[in-house]
Image: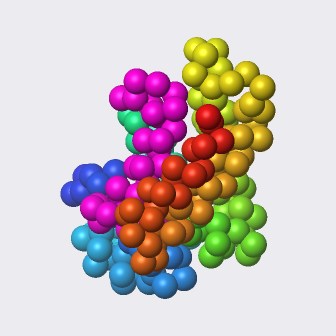
Amino acid sequence: MARNKEFDEQVVLKKAMELFWKQGYEKTSMQDLVNHMGIHRRSIYDTFGDKYSLFLASLKFYEVFVAEELTKIISNSSTVKIAIRNIFEYVVNLAEFEIYPAGCFAVNTAVELSLLDKDIQHLTTKMFNDTEELLNKLLKEGQNKGEIKNDLNTLVTAQFLHNNLIGLRVLVKTNYTKKELESIIDLILKVLE
């Protein structure tokens, strides 16, 4: 007879995500995962498979987490321009409050593994494309509402904004001050004027 799990899969998967986010794939051992997740090694294997499968599940968990956070940011913003600014500021604030590891799990993963692993490359590229598409939709909505000039190429601008968002996610891992990062955001967003 199978035993009931004594843990919440989503809770321990979130813990795995946080550890992989902080340390990366290569520097995270199974023992690190056992210690951080607070479950037995056998439970990890039985529930998620091997370390690689757990890493992929963690990355997919992160994808959903980011989509939910962006949806909240957008729905709590009064205009499209404010929504885009709030997305950039969220990256800075998240690092400042140290709620999660600094930077972006998807960016870290792309840098560490995408050239070595096609599945990882596909997943991180999809995540980046989804963010660009979200920004593109926001820009089009801004044009429809008269907030953003109609001659702005929304696709190219979305790619530009996303590229800068990735750069900001890297800079928050360094010694840049919040004031310096906010000045960078101000300059990036001049493209929307």
Does residue 97 belong to the magenta stretch? Answer: yes
Instruction: Give me the residue at 65% from left, 20% from top.
Output: 143
Is residue 95 or residue 60 the one in the foreground?
A: 95
Q: Classify residue 76 as left or right of residue 164.
A: left
Image coords of residue 90 (percent x, y): 40, 49
Instruction: Give me the residue at 53% from left, 76% from top.
Output: 25
Q: Is residue 127 visible?
A: no
Image coords of residue 160 (percent x, y): 70, 48
Q: Residue furthest left?
A: 6
Image coords of residue 36 (percent x, y): 29, 74
Q: Is residue 43 visible?
A: yes
Image coords of residue 139 (percent x, y): 63, 29
Q: Quadrant of residue 133?
A: top right
Is residue 31 or residue 41 the one in the foreground?
A: 31
Tell me the quadrant of the picture where the N terminus can be found.
bottom left
Q: Residue furthest top?
A: 145
The answer to whether residue 17 is above or below residue 152 is below
The answer to whether residue 28 is above or below residue 74 is below
Instruction: Give me the residue at 44% from left, 83% from top.
Output: 29
The answer to whether residue 22 is above or below residue 129 is below
Instruction: Give me the residue at 65% from left, 41% from top.
Output: 191
Q: Classify residue 188 as left or right of residue 117.
A: left
Q: Classify residue 118 as left or right of residue 8.
A: right
Overall secondary structure of the magenta stretch?
A: helix
Q: Quadrant of residue 7?
A: bottom left
Q: Which residues are magenta?
A: 74-103
Does residue 80 belong to the magenta stretch? Answer: yes
Tell me the quadrant of the picture where the C terminus can be found.
top right
Is residue 97 or residue 111 the one in the foreground?
A: 97
Q: Quadrant of residue 96?
A: bottom left
